[in-house]
Amino acid sequence: APGLSTIITAINRSRKIFNRLNGYVLYRMASSVLILGFFFLSIVALQFDFPTWVLILLSLVNDFTAMATSKDSCRPAEEPLKWNMVHTTIISVVIGLVGVLENILLLWLSDPRYVSWWSGWGLEEL
């Protein structure tokens, strides 16, 4: 029936929008945990000093990657969806904490005060 196809199309589009919105919220929460955790630990634990331009560049790059979540390829769900913020928060925090751990480890490995492996690769220290 021609009247039902419009309703089905609207439902499918709304489910796609919900999936994109859920992905965006997950990304934003995970990136907030990552950025705050990394800067806090690198400044407090490693006494690392960041120039101001790094923060400006980080905020620009973070906005560009957030724009990419609006054009992702997603399929509509088969059944109605609802928010599960406990699930979304747990996943976001885990992703963010893994990112913090990776970034702190990379920063620690690149700092000659803690590990000096640059000369083994034939490179000058930073």
Image (cartoon, rainbow, N blue to C red):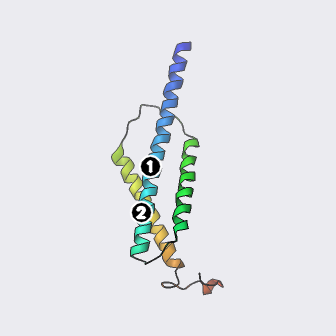
Q: Quadrant of residue 32?
A: bottom left
- Please say if 88 is above or below 49: above
**From what the image shows, is residue 106 above or below residue 116?**
above
Does residue 116 sit above or below 55 in this rendering?
Answer: below
Neighbour class for label 1 at 10 Å: few (<14), some, many (≥20)? many
- Please name the residue shown 47% across and 41% down the image: 21
User: The C terminus lies in which quarter of the figure?
Assistant: bottom right
Q: Residue furthest right?
A: 122
Q: Nearer the viewer, residue 63 or 87?
A: 63
**Mark 1 is on which residue type?**
Leu
Q: Amino acid at mark 2?
A: Leu
Counting from the top left corner in percent of width and height, residue 6 is at: 54, 19
- Estimate the x, y position of residue 79 in percent, counting from the top left: 43, 31
Q: Is residue 4 left or right of residue 124?
A: left
- Residue 120 appears at what percent x and percent y? 61, 86
In this rendering, would 33 be left or right of 3? left
Q: Which residue is more in the foreground, 81 or 114?
A: 114
> What residue does disc 1 label?
26
User: Residue placed at 46% from the left, 37% from the top?
Assistant: 18
Q: Residues within 10 Å of mark 2 (few under 14, many from 20)?
A: few
| Picture residue at 57% right of the left edge, 52% below the top | 64
Quarter of the image holding residue 35?
bottom left
- Dot 1 falls on a residue whose secondary structure is helix
For disc 2, the marked residue is 36
